Image (cartoon, rainbow, N blue to C red):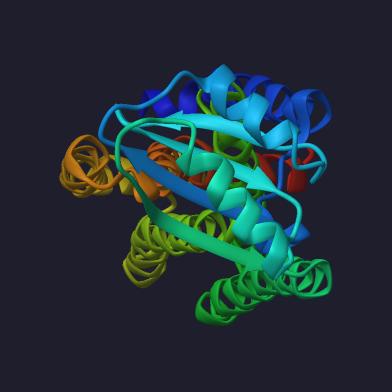
Amino acid sequence: MFIITYRKLFYALSLILVVVSLFAFITPGMRFGIDFVGGTITEVSYVNRPEKTIIEENIKRLSIGDTIIQPIGTNGYVIRSKELSEQEKVQFMSALSVASNTMMSVERYNSIGPVVGNELRQKAYTAIAVVVVLIVLFVTFAFRKVSEPVASWKFGLATIIALAHDILIPTGAFIFISYFIGGDVDMLFVSAILAILGFSVHDTIVVFDRVREHLGLNKKNNINEPFDITVGKSVRETFSRSINTSITIFIVLMALFILGPETTRNFTLTLIIGIITGTYSSIFIASPLLVTFQKLQNKKII
């Protein structure tokens, strides 16, 4: 199959995307939401939204430090600031309400202390790490009876590489996109990454399982079939299933992205990017890596 034959091209494309994603971690860098660093996030809506400069001037008079004000929808703003005391909160709301001659309503007000935020961030890192480790252990255990032409642990290694690919690219894309349209790395983002990992490994295992089936049949029928042919055949047989499943999920997520609430838009966008990269890695990265490992094992050129 052409995917196996031209695997170097797909490796190169993924490498470029990963490098760009790693660059995003440096510039502009991850901007953590109040879930992880602490602070206050306030979402307000107006019947007749005032100019952003008017709100900025009113807030500056309060001396509460730096704030980030972002328009949301057609009639609202999201304001991020430090953790506010009760007195500061009253003054803050007063500053927002006098910014317009029309009615203002508070859609959301969340406040988290820096200690709690740091604890949540550490737990998020731990959750992602634990999920990745458990997935790799499961894959290695599930394919423990496969010893030729590649060892079972190499199925796990291919899974690790694919999962790293599926974490880095969506995260890098989210950092770049959020830099222009706004958005923070919060618990919803972490939830999206965990969902992407689950989808990606599910898609990968389907292909790996078909490879295992063909290896078993070849051994049973004493068929000496080249490993790259076996993997290519397995990918071809599962290709339509993977694409159709991804398209179905993609359509649902696009509907949620377009018609859903503003608060879940970044979460949905991350899932959309993750579904695309997860499908790509399962077909074009994880499976060809098995052939690469086998050729390296036999001291052949990749």
Above or below, 134 against 45 in this view is: below
Q: In this view, does 301 lie above or below 89?
A: above
Q: Quadrant of the N terminus?
A: top left
Q: Is residue 79 left or right of residue 106?
A: right
Residue drawn where x is 79% and y is 37% of the image:
66
Camera-side residue: 103 or 39?
103
Quadrant hosting residue 37: bottom right
Instruction: Give 251 or 34, whichever is nearer the viewer.
Output: 34
Q: Residue at x 68, y 73 (%)?
A: 133
In the image, taking residue 302 as reference, residue 14 lies left or right, namely left
Q: In which quarter of the image is the C terminus?
A: top right
Count of number-bearing discs = 0
| Spot occupied by residue 226 in the image (x, y as percentages of width and height) | 48, 43
Give whichever of 71, 165 is nearer the camera.
Answer: 71
Residue 202 in sight: yes
Residue 279 location (% of width, % of height): 38, 42
Q: Is residue 158 visible?
A: no
In the image, is 129 to the left or to the right of 262? right
Q: Of 247 and 180, which appears nearest the observer?
A: 180
The residue lying at 35 percent from left, 72 percent from top is 220
101 displayed left or right of 169 = left
Q: Looking at the picture, does residue 276 appear above or below residue 3? A: below
Residue 52: where, in percent of width, then height?
A: 52, 21
Q: Position of residue 209 (x, y in %)?
A: 38, 65
